[in-house]
Structures are given as structure tokens and as C-alpha cells.
Amino acid sequence: MNPDHYINRELSWLAFNERVLEEAGKANLPLLERIKFLAITASNLDEFFMVRVGGLQYMKDSGKRVRDLTGLTPTQQLAAIAERTNAFVERQYQILNHELLPGLRENGIRRLLPEELTPAQRTYLGDYFTEQLFPVLSPIALDTEGQRIHLPALQIILVCEVRSQQAGTDNTRHVLFTLPSNIPRHIVVPTLEDGTHAYINVDDLAELFLHQYFPKEQVIASARFRISLNSDITLDDESAMDLVAEMEQILEARKASNTIRLEIEVGATSALIKIIQGLCGVSAQQTSMIPGELDLRSYFAIASLPGFEKLKVEPWPTEQVQGGLSEETIFDRINQGDILLYHPYQSFEPVIQLLEQAAVDTNVVAIKQILYRTAKNSRIISALIKAAQAGKHVTVLVELKARFDEARNLERAEDLINAGAQIIYGVRGLKTHAKICLVMRREGGRMVRYCHFGTGNYNESTAKLYTDISYLTNRADYGADASAFFNTVTGRSRFVHFQRISMAPFGLRERLLDLIHSETERAKQGDTAEMILKMNSLEDVQMIDSLYEASKAGVKINLIIRGICCLRSGIKNLSENIRVISIVDRYLEHGRIYWFRQGGNPVVFISSADFMTRNLSKRVELLTPIEDTNAKKRLLEILLTQLEDNVQARELHKDGQFYLLKGAKGKNLRSQEYFSKQSAKLTRARTQSPDLLIPHKPIITV
């Protein structure tokens, strides 16, 4: 294994976040769209530190020197990450402080600093502080230097130095305040100017009136900081007797885990910096001095401010493929033929309707469902509860190990149990990441199984923001596979080979490798061989090496990879037949589509799995073949259109960097915009047609 043939996973992920930041830096995008991308990069970086950097730090502290694909030890990776993230944060704040904030101010959205407040505004905010913040915040005295207390992750914390006089002697002490996450970050400030939104950050407001807590003392210095804790704490569910209790312990342990990153806003005194580092138990190397306000995630709220539509992108339409114009049920529509949906260009509503209609349909006997991440007020869970309350046999596998969604999943599982549903808490030793729903319905004296297979979560909120594929069918062999799948994961049955679908960790990897090897053998025999693979991440070394072998044999390989890519393209005699592009645009590219030429009889799959070791070997995933002719053509059209994108696509070069493509004059193609226009045309056509489901006709052929 040659380390030069691979790209470090962590640095590849950071490169993806840099591509997102490039969108925030684009002067041709509306200001609030740029602000949204900036907030996304901040949220991404928080999770990266808590999970990936947390794991590396643990390995380093444990003395482990295991090397990654590129030959780097944990210590070397941490050093490379620090260098890269320091430059990244500098760029974030350069964009914010010098481009976005001035632009917002010019357009009526103003962050006010304390020194800018008028006397009337200061009086208003003083009253607000007294009524809304003073009773909530709790000062915590720090008794000794180096004192360790449990600090909340990702919340802004204030520490101040307070001076008092006793018996003619000056005494100083230090007091800490945490700003709870349920307090609004931005406090609206009254202004006489119409069409203006003025606000002050809550940390500015708190610092402005901290003296109210110390009536006979003086606040002589203060500083703001924020910590990221190691969340790479895993559950040993092989020996867990009570999975719910064990998960609750994990959530508690996460609150008290080690600090991975300390952010201190520039302006803190060296004495306070030292105190903060002692509180958090971190070194100077783990401390980032931030040249501006902390926690840029708060700009999600600014990005969605009402009344500033001129600063936002024009909304793209969603094709309403199932609606109130017809009395047909979703079951009637599926009986007419398989349905393939491309979200969010096509509505997620048919998937929700499958469950909502099943909940009240007297012919529906049972529903089986996998839930990984759900919306806050999920209609899907409400439908499952309603179905259970109606006496239907409802079985739901709720994945408690879905990172950062554990608490919500525990709560919703309890709601389902109370409604009478049968709950399974995942699979021992594995995360269940498959996207599948099975509805069993009596029709004409027989049982018909309706299936939904998807690439994304059952989450109606993210279905509006992520591009994903849904496939609805009542084909008998797919229904039999779905039943066998649920029997396997909920009943601890022995794994059986399915008729159509493939399941990780038992066979999915092998199915994909067989397809890659098949193309490789065809190329060696002089046949035309080709594959187009769209995924979120490519990291698994076995999959990478199989693609290298295919490339060396002459297989034409196009990869559409949103995030991590540890494969190097363009290396002579290794990967010169591999092209890799990454698309970062308004929607998060999330669908997995795998297409293989197979000697002129192409096969195409959708999947919940990326080409990552965790997906292929450590999770329950599904690979679903699409056999409907129109659906296959539609998936190929999606792939080919994205490969032609020369506006938002970036191509991987052999130096390991992604570069924006340059389109010929007048021949620019932005794939996401193209798909949205397609949806608009179909929506217009639908208003003139009784058909609610109009098949897409491919405009690109191979």
C-alpha cells in the first residue's frame, strides 16, 4: 500500500468544509444565502471537532501510533488539522467581518455593539436584562486557580474578574456565567428606522449589565469562551443489559468528557486566558483565539429573517407529485406502477402519505419501519402512533446510536411504546442506518406488501434541504425481501440471501465489489466498461483499491462525491481513468446512486450506504436495485446531468485539491437549478392534466 495513493480522511473532510465556505465568500450570491453557508461551516466544524478530532485526541493520549492510509500518526494528523483549521477560521471571520456584516448593515440588518446604543436603547435593554436575563443567569464563583467544573459544550460562557475592598485592601475574585442555549442569541433593539432589523448579541448584553450581580464590587475584566467536548464515546452494546439505561449513561458521560477545543474571543487578558485554560484542562495548542463573535451557528436565525426577501435566493419549486386533485390513494398510485421520487425537486409528501393513509386504512394490517433521524414534530411518528392506537401491528426499529439524536430518539420511542407500538432499539453491535418502510395490506383476499426504500432519513424537514431518492413499489419479490429484512434485524434471525436487495454487513460490500470486478473483467476483454457512482463519502481502502484496479484495466469511472474522498484521481497507470467531482450548492447532495454499464444491460441501485468502512462493515444498510425502466432512465439522467455541471461542480486534481470547473461561454449548466426548472415545468403540466404522476423523459442518453 503506497501512502501517496490516498488522501487523509480528516483533511479531505476539511477540504469539503472549505468548499462550503467558498459559497459564503461568493459576492454574486444574496447576502442571507452567504450567511447561511457560513453558519453551515460553523456547525460542520463543531461536529468535526467533537467526533473526529475527539477520537484522534483519545488515540494520542492513549499512546497509540497507528497510521492512517497516508502514513500519518494521530499526533501528525492533529498537527495538520490544527494548521488547516486555523487558516479556515481566519477565512470565516474575514468573510464575516469585512464582507457580510458591512453588507447586512447597508441593507438594514445591523448588529449593534454596546458603544453604538442610544440612551433610549440602553434603557430598554437594561429593563430587558433585569426582567429576562438577571433571574436566569447564575454566577458561579471560582475559588481556586485550575479549578475544574463541568462546563456545557457549545454554549457561550462568560468569566469576569471582580474587585472589592475589604478593610482597605483590594481583593479580586473570578466568577463564571453560562448563557443557556434556550435564551435567544440575538435580542431585537427598537429603532425608528422603517425596514431595519437591529439586534444586540445576548453575550454583549450580559457583559454590559454584569455589574448588577455585584452591587458593591467592580467588574474590571471579562472574557467569553466556548468549548467543544469529546463526543466520540461509543456504546458497548454487546454487553449492555439495558440499552436505554446504557444510552442515558452515555449521554451523561458526554457532558463530562474532555475538552477537545477551546475558543476564546479576542480581547481577553492573558490572566483570564490562563484561568479559562485551567478550567477546561487544555493546553495553548488546543486554544483558538477567535477574531470576532463566538458561535457562528447563530447566523442560521439571521439567514431566515422574515421581510428581507431581496437578500435571499428565489425559492425553487417542488413538484407536488401527489395531492388533493385526485381521490386515488397512494396505494392506488403504486398499483399503477413503481414511483421514483427525487427530493426536494419532487415532494416528500407521497412517503408521508403512505404512512398517514396506512394509519387509517382498515385494510392495513401491519407497518414496519426503520427510524434513524426524524423531524422535531414528525408527521411520520404521529402516523405510526395513530396506527398503533388504531390496533394495527406497528413495529419500529429506533436507532438509539444515531449520534446527537439519541435523546430525541429515546423520547419518541417512549411515545410509540405508550401508543402500543412494538419497539426495537437497534441491532446489537451495529448501527441501523437502512431506510425502509413496509406496509402490509389486505386486498382481494391476499396480502399485498407496499415498500418504500430511500437514501435519506424519514425526516420531512431535511427532505426539503437534502437531495435524496425515494422508491415506492409493491413488487412481490421486493416485499418478500423487505419482510425477510425485518425478520432478520428484529428477530435476530440468521441472515438469508435476498432476492433483490443486499444488506450490510452481510453481502452489500461483496455485491458492489462483484459489480466493480465485472466491469474490470469486461475492460480486460476489450469490451466497453463504465460505472458512475454518486455518494457522500469514499474512504474504504478495499473499495478504493478495487476502483484503482478497474481504472488500470481501462474502465471509465465517474465519481460524484460530496464530501470525503480518500482516492487520488489522475495518477498515471493507477487512476487516470477516474474522474471525481463534488457539487456544493443550495441543497445538500445526499443521495447514493450506483450505475454499472454491464455490457450494455445497465444495472442501477440506490443505497443508504456510502463507500465507507463504517457503512459497509459496521452498520445495517441496504442496496436496492431499481428495475422499473422509467425509473432507471431517470436515475441515469440525474447522474449524467450532474457530470455536466460546470457551475457548482468542482473537480478533484491529482494534487488532492478540488477546483471549480470553467464552462464554455453560453454553455453553463448548474444541475440543481436544472432539476428545479424541470420540476416547475412538470408542475405547470400537471395543472393541465388529470395525471398526478407524470414520468420524467430523459433528455440525455448514453
Image (spheres, helix red, strand yellow):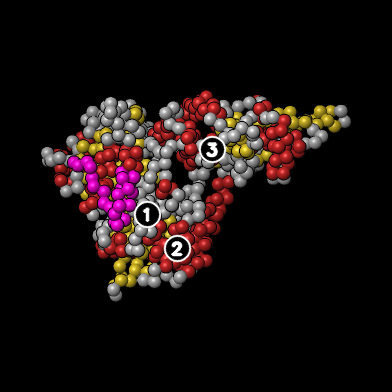
Whether pointer 2 and pointer 3 mark residues with C-beta atoms closer than 8 Å, the reply is no
Q: Position of residue 220 (x, y in %)?
A: 74, 28
Reply above or below: 175 against 474.
above
How far is disc 2 from disc 3 in space, using C-alphas? 35 Å
Point out the tag, 2 or 3, that comes first from the N-terminus. 3
Reply above or below: 637 against 110.
below
Q: Residues within 10 Å of mark 3 (few under 14, many from 20)?
A: some
Disc 2 element: helix
Region rendered in magenta: 678-702
Kindly tell me whether residue 368 is visible in this rendering. Answer: yes
Numbered disc in front, either 3 or 1: 3
The answer to which of 228 and 317 lies nearer the viewer is 317
Q: Position of residue 679 (x, y in %)?
A: 33, 46
Kindly tell me whether residue 574 is visible in this rendering. Answer: no
Q: Position of residue 160 (x, y in %)?
A: 70, 33
Numbered disc in front, either 1 or 2: 2
The residue depicted at 45 percent of the width and 63 percent of the height is 384
The residue depicted at 31 percent of the width and 56 percent of the height is 692
Point out the tag, 1 or 2, that comes first from the N-terminus. 2
Disc 1 element: loop
Q: Which mark is residue 52?
A: none
The residue depicted at 51 percent of the width and 58 percent of the height is 412
Asked if the magenta segment contains residue 353, the reply would be no
Q: Which mark is residue 384?
A: 2
Q: Which mark is residue 435?
A: 1
Q: Position of residue 37 (x, y in %)?
A: 46, 35
Amino acid type indicated by mark 1: Lys
The answer to which of 494 and 391 lies nearer the viewer is 391
Amino acid type indicated by mark 3: Ile
Amino acid type indicated by mark 2: Leu
Point out the tag, 3 or 1, that comes first from the N-terminus. 3
For label 3, the residue is 302
